[in-house]
Amino acid sequence: MKKRNNWKKYIESFPATSTIILAMSIIHLLTIVKGNGATDFETARQFGAMQSNNKEWSEFPYLLTSSYQHIGGFLHLAMNVLAIIFIAPFLERLFGTFKFVLLFNLCGIFGGLVTLLFTSDVTSSGASGAVFGMLGIYIALMVKQHPLLTSEISSPMIGITVINVITTFLIPGISITAHLGGLFAGMLLGMWFPTSKTFVKESIVGSVFKTIVTTLVLFALLLIPQNVIKSHSFVDIATQVGLGDYVTGKKTVPLFNLHRDPILDEINWLIDQYNENSVTHYNGLVEDYNSGINKENIATQLNSIDETIKLLEENIETIKEHVDIEDTEKLQQQLLLMNELLLEAAEQAKKTLETMDSVEGDLFIEKINAVNDEYETFNSMLNKFRNEYGLE
């Protein structure tokens, strides 16, 4: 009963923090109930994980959602939740719900943005960028010598910050970009955001409402670039501010790639190629073929198939030119075979629509079935590889 009362008191005292933790827990549960678990890359993406390989405005909403999904599984979630439980309450009471939630999300967004700018072929998620952002805010408050920040609070935070920064560079698999990006954002925002001279107390309903609305408004704002900025891509804007070579991967920051796992990098690259290119082209081809086979005017479908053929040829060259590693060489060869067979199917689909010959149509069905078989082989190989290397 005492433990229940403690939790009840915590929720009543820090409703915004509790709402954030609840949202993360629900998303983690949904990855299990509605997907293949949080450690599955496709499921993680479906529920908000960010892919740094997508250098487009369409990736911006994931800068926010990736803070609430934890691709590392329950342990990843639990560690961040424990950090939030300990670190966030003081800041919630100091800033009030609106400013606290805004700061939390902005730190996570900035950590994600640094990852998007300076890394490639990385699927990432987790609240650690926002957690480091909160630690950065504590540093700013110490610099500003805020009267409510006593030594009993600041001293443990200094120790936690030092330990977390050190482990960031020692433990493989941790996103250095998200951690440092969040920390820097927290320090900057903490210096700029005004704080209350007394602790803020808000009702549970009002605080929960503000938490949800503030987060949704930020999400809506992140949707704007892909719908408004049509003339300039994300890469174009990054180039204008001198970061173009980092976004395209021509230049790298050694510090940000200190302990990247080459096997995990290759798996991420293969999955991105599969999801963003192979599957997309396959679905588009089947849709064009099915809609064109029963039409007299098939110019639109033929043009679309021509574009698919062009993209497949480019994708095949990309896969051939990609420098593989021994561990994932067979997977890359299987991916190449899938795309080559899909190209043959696309060329056959075009020929079938041009001639409307049933024999040609049978050949297309035969080729597309062959592609399906190779897709199943690829997924089987991928799952086996994940199990062998402990990536599940």
Image (tube, rainbow, N blue to C red):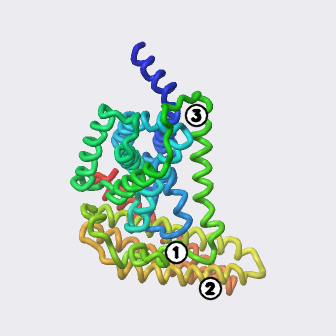
Residue assigned mark 2: 351
Depth order, front residue of 364/212 = 212
Q: Which disc number belongs to residue 207?
A: 3
Residue shown at the point (31%, 70%) measured from the top left = 253
Dot 3 lies on which element? Answer: helix
Residue 313, percent from left and from top: 48, 83
Q: Nearer the viewer, residue 278 or 323?
A: 323
Count of marks placed on residues: 3
Residue in view at x 29 percent, y 67 percent: 328
Q: Which residue is mark 1?
A: 237
**Which amino acid, mark 3?**
Ser
Disc assigned to residue 374: none
- Disc 1: CA contacts within 10 A as few (<14), some (14-19) or many (>=20): few
Q: Is residue 1 visible?
A: yes
The residue mark sitting in front, 2 or 1, is: 1
Q: Quadrant of the N terminus?
A: top left
Locate residue 350: give its quadrant: bottom right
Q: What amino acid is labelled 1 in the image? A: Ile
